[in-house]
Image (spheres, grey):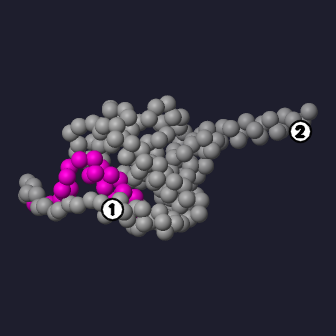
Amino acid sequence: MEVIKMELLCIDFINSQWYKTHKVFKELLKDEKWFKNFCLKWNLSITYMPNKEMIDTLLGLREFLSYVTNNLCTKKTIDLKDINKINEYLKAFSFYKMIEKEKDSFSLKTIPVKSDLSFILFEIISSFAELITKYDIQRIKLCENPECGWIFYDESRNRTRKWCDNTCATLIKVRRFRENQKHIQRKSK
Ligand SMILES: [Zn+2]
């Protein structure tokens, strides 16, 4: 089985509501260390930790994106009112382009007018906009482990991937095997 993991900022952000072991032990968005690493990983240069109001805004965005993605996975579409809400988010940001000189080339960068939390919100919502416009929405899936809430992008050739990662795949396979064993034992009694 091919396991390719496409990484997207919005998927990482939505999945942050589930701890790595798939149990919510604490809110990662309130964990300074986690948040710093998250920003570092996705090039979201912020020099301070978000205050309570900002965290609430991020939590609100995550709840909304999570709801939209769940709809997308089950209904394979997004309601127009939700698309309008995404557009409201996108409209709320202003930025400009700037050329930066590098060693022996130039690069065009997008610079937010205000370099604060709105930049993070914009990057997350842009990443989500990219996901639903540039990628195959049929491949956006919810992990089939009922105790897991992770979403993932199925890059397998036949779109047959069911689990977010090997942890869930193994867990469910072992559980099914045990259930089958019980079934066999009951039959033989
Ligand atoms: Zn999973």
Is any atom of residue 37 visible in this view?
no
Q: CA distance from mark 2 to mark 1?
A: 59 Å
Q: Nearer the viewer, mark 2 or mark 1?
A: 1
Residue at image point 34% right, 41% down: 53
Give the magenta part as a residue range: 105-129
Query: Does mark 2's beta carbon lie closer than 8 Å to ligand 1?
Result: no
- The disc placed on residue 90 is 1
Mark 2 neighbour class, 10 Å CA radius: few under 14, some 14 to 19, many 20 or more: few
Q: Residue at x 70, y 41 (%)?
A: 176
**What residue is pinned by disc 2?**
187
Outermost residue on the front side: it is 53
Looking at the picture, does residue 4 appear above or below residue 135? above
Q: Is residue 95 left or right of residue 1?
A: left
Total residue callouts:
2
Circle 2: residue type: Lys
| Residue 56 vs residue 143, the one in the foreground | 56
Residue at x-position 59% and y-position 59%? 74
The one of 50 and 37 positioned closer to us in this rendering: 50
Which residue is nearer to you in this view: 138 or 91? Answer: 91
Q: Dot 1 surroundings within 10 Å: few (below 14), some, or many (20 or more)?
A: some
Q: Secondary structure at mark 1?
A: helix
41 left or right, relative to 155: left
Q: Is residue 66 above or below residue 27?
A: below
Amino acid under disc 1: Leu
Reply yes or no: does residue 126 show up in magenta.
yes
Percent of width and height locating residue 166? 53, 42
Residue 13 spot, x, y in % from top left: 40, 47
Inspect this view and state whether residue 9 appears: yes
Q: Quadrant of residue 169?
A: top right
Q: Residue at x 30, y 60 (%)?
A: 92
Q: Secondary structure at mark 2?
A: helix
